[in-house]
Image: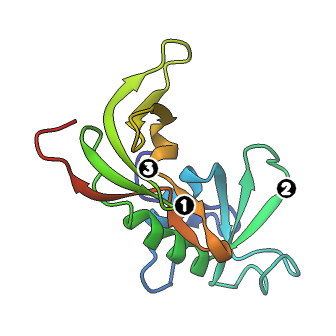
Amino acid sequence: MNDSTLYDKQTGAPATVSHPGVSVADVKLFCEQNALQFHAMGCPEGAGGSGWSDSTVFRTATHEYPARGVTISLDTVAEWKRAFDAIGPRVVEGGVCRHWEGEVYTTMCEATEMEGGRTVIVYRDAVGRAQTLPVEQFFGVEKGAGGRFVPRFAFVRQMKGGV
């Protein structure tokens, strides 16, 4: 999907989103980042909303279980979007970032795994131990305390002079 439209399989037309602060592009990115396939606005009766005319929810399928649907509230997308936006600049060299559990790490560089070819962020902890995470996980969103979405690593500041 390289444009900002979603096809609503119930109406046979492009999906429309009528939620303050949430756009079709936000729903599309939410689905992509959470391994979901958008199906339609609304949902079947009794599946977490009030039917296909319910404009507060949308229906998805998961990559693991394409035949099973998941109903998601647009309020959930709004909360996720706030957390995703709170990640801040995606600095891959010399960025000081706070992990959602409170520890502070410094990004060293972006690298490519030899096997698999995944792009990873190389970062180090306060005592200098290096670790890696795939880029989409490092700059991703996590369910924090109370089940609220929070950035996995939030940008704090850029180190002077790099790493």
> How many neighbours does mark 3 have within 10 angstroms: few (below 14), some (14-19), or many (20 or more)?
many
Residue under label 1, please give it. Answer: 101
Residue under label 3, please give it. Answer: 139
How far is disc 3 from disc 1 in space, using C-alphas? 15 Å
Asked if the residues shown at circle 3 and circle 2 are in contact, with their CB atoms under 8 angstroms apart, the answer is: no
Residue 146 percent across, percent down from the top left: 67, 77
Of the residues shown, which amino acid type is indicated by label 3? Answer: Phe
**Quarter of the image where one finds residue 47:** bottom right
> How many neighbours does mark 2 have within 10 angstroms: few (below 14), some (14-19), or many (20 or more)?
few
- Residue 93 numbered mark, or none: none
Q: Secondary structure at mark 3?
A: loop
Of the residues shown, which amino acid type is indicated by label 2? Answer: Arg
Closer to the N terminus: mark 3 or mark 2?
A: 2
**Quarter of the image where one finds residue 2:** top left
Asked if the residues shown at circle 3 and circle 1 are in contact, with their CB atoms under 8 angstroms apart, the answer is: no
Q: How is the image coloured?
A: rainbow
Of the residues shown, which amino acid type is indicated by label 1? Answer: Glu
As rendered, which of 154 and 141 lies closer to the eye?
154
Q: Secondary structure at mark 2?
A: loop
Left or right position of 136 against 146 = left
Left or right position of 17 against 62 = left
Closer to the N terminus: mark 3 or mark 1?
A: 1
Q: Residue at x 73, y 44 (%)?
A: 63
Residue under label 2, please give it. Answer: 68
Closer to the N terminus: mark 2 or mark 1?
A: 2
As rendered, which of 93 and 45 lies closer to the eye?
93
Residue 52 in sight here:
yes
Q: Residue at x 49, y 53 (%)?
A: 140
